[in-house]
Image: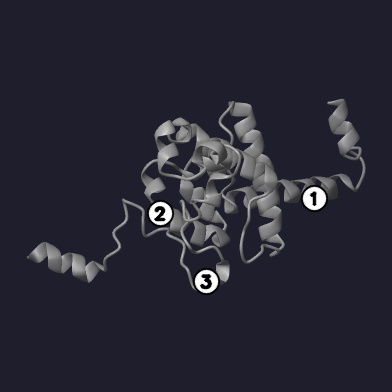
Amino acid sequence: MKRKKEILPAKTSRWRPTAIFFIAVIIGLGLFMAKESKVLSYMSDDPQACVNCHVMTPVYNSWMHSSHREWAKCNDCHVPHNNIFNKYYFKAKDGLYHASVFTMRAEPDVIKMKEASQEVVQQNCIRCHIQQVTQTKYKSWIDDHEGNRTGRQCWSCHKLVPHGKVHGLSTIKFNIAPLPTDQEDELVIPSWMEKELKDQ
């Protein structure tokens, strides 16, 4: 109760209703912004959460057409998996950075990983592909594979995995986000065509 008195003017003050109004406006705007930015979706492992920011659409679409789609989601590669706290701390830190850059419209044409993200992705490549990294059978047919397989980043050789050749926003000028057409519950054919198909 004491804290309430510290925040709000005294009950007899004419500023009390104004203060309550502005506090309500700030809380309301905060809730509205949280709903519009789909803030809870970022807590999930759903890859479509990444497409909330339209600049990620080319990246999402290139992943959708890769072999990794069947085995790995965005978070499998881009967040640490050593413990749950580190995972969500990294997601929050990265997410706040991305949100601020995208909100200010300061994103580069080609999005590149920062050093911390590169380290996480490298560790996740090794985590999933440990057999390929440690097997000695590759020694005979890939030059320097034994000596270099842990000393450099996986994507220095595997450049097209999993995001393909498309790396810039300007390369896909009118790229449309996959929502809602890849939702299973929603039909994407016109109602007249659906009727024709049922009549046959």
Q: CA distance from mark 3 to mark 2?
A: 17 Å
Helix, strand or loop for disc 3: helix
Q: Which residue is mark 2?
A: 64
Q: Position of residue 131 (x, y in %)?
A: 43, 31
- Residue type for callout 2: Met
Camera-side mark, 2 or 1: 2
Q: Which residue is mark 3?
A: 171
- Label 3 and label 1: CA atoms lie apart by 45 Å
In-front residue for pair 99/28:
99
Earlier in the chain: of badge 3 and badge 2, it is: 2
Residue 10 percent coordinates (x, y): 91, 37
Is 193 left or right of 175, judged from the image as shown? left
- Mark 2 or 1, nearer chain start: 1
Q: Residues within 10 Å of mark 3 (few under 14, many from 20)?
A: few
Position of 8 compared to 57: left or right? right
Q: Position of residue 18 (x, y in %)?
A: 84, 50
Query: Could you say where residue 162 lies in the image, as x and y percent from the top left?
Result: 46, 51
Q: Nearer the viewer, mark 3 or mark 1?
A: 3
Q: Secondary structure at mark 1?
A: helix
- Which residue is located at x 55 percent, y 37 percent? 147
Residue 12 higher or lower than 82, as above or below? below
Q: Are marks 3 and 1 in contact (CB under 8 Å)?
A: no
Instruction: State the residue at coordinates (66%, 64%).
Output: 108
Which circle's residue, 3 or 1, is located before the other in the chain?
1
Within 10 Å of the Cα at label 1, are there few (<14), some (14-19), or many (20+) other Cα atoms?
A: few
Quadrant where the C terminus lies? bottom left
Looking at this view, name the residue that lies furthest to the left.
200
Q: Where, quadrant-wise, is the N terminus in this rendering?
A: top right
Q: 107 left or right of 84?
A: right
Q: Which residue is mark 1?
A: 22
The residue shown at (57%, 57%) is 53
